Image (cartoon, rainbow, N blue to C red):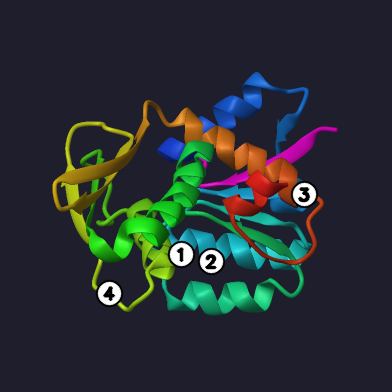
Amino acid sequence: MTTRVFVQGLRGRMGQAVSGLIGEDDARFALAHRVEDADVVVDFSSPQGALDALRACVAEKVPLVTGTTALENDWQAARDVAAASIAILEAPNMSLGVNLVYRLLDIAASSIGDEADIDIIETHHTAKVDAPSGTALRMGEVIREALSEASDAPRYHSLRAGDIPGEHRVKFTLAGEQVEMSHFALNRSIFARGALHAAEWIRTASPGVYSMQDVLDG
């Protein structure tokens, strides 16, 4: 079954990566030129672009997959209302590998987080505006949710250099030893592949708010 995808932010780096993969796999995907012709909308744009996509999806009863970061309170309020009528998958990082790391961080933080100094170091290309990255912030949320007591952990460190698609390292430093988890994006296709994987999954999902963890489970 072919999934027709409308790409919000088509001219951006990630939009181009998604449309390129759609063109390479025309047995599974087709590029839709209007929201009303789509089975799913995939959004990699801006906070305002994500809101525009959400409103269009509600109007046309089309599910939405968004990887846009730095979304603010107006997005969250609109998303919660929209989730009553459409399925919405929101993920600051669509990589299947990164979402596996989230699960491993939960295990590590639950086991040694209360005794460790925890640092998240993320590096991205110079054109990336938000810092820390959405992925780093989500890693921090996972860690804090797993700690037994309220904590200021983790500490964030952001670097912007060259054209690096994305690097994330999380260090748990204990007395005499250090545990590190890391993920390196070698190119942007991993995010585009994850987004299309999510698009296929959410096409038949019931209205509500989902994450890539649901896709991994599903």
CB-based contact (under 8 Å), mark 2 and mark 4? no
Above or below, 24 relative to 88: above
Which of the numbered marks, if any, corresponds to residue 200? none
Q: Secondary structure at mark 4?
A: loop
5 drawn magenta = yes
Which of the numbered marks, if any, corresponds to residue 151? 4
Q: Earlier in the sequence, mark 1 or mark 4?
A: 1
Identify which residue is drawn at 39% across, 65% down: 141
User: Which residue corresponds to mark 3?
Assistant: 203
User: Which residue corresponds to mark 2?
Assistant: 51
Alpha carbon of mark 3 to alpha carbon of mark 1: how far?
Answer: 24 Å
Q: Secondary structure at mark 3?
A: loop
Q: Callout 4: 10 Å neighbours few (<14), some, many (20+)?
A: few
Q: Secondary structure at mark 1?
A: helix
Q: Nearer the viewer, mark 2 or mark 3?
A: 3
Alpha carbon of mark 2 to alpha carbon of mark 1: how far?
Answer: 5 Å
Q: Earlier in the sequence, mark 3 or mark 1?
A: 1
User: Which residue corresponds to mark 1?
Assistant: 48
Span shown in magenta: 1-11
Q: Amino acid at mark 3?
A: Arg
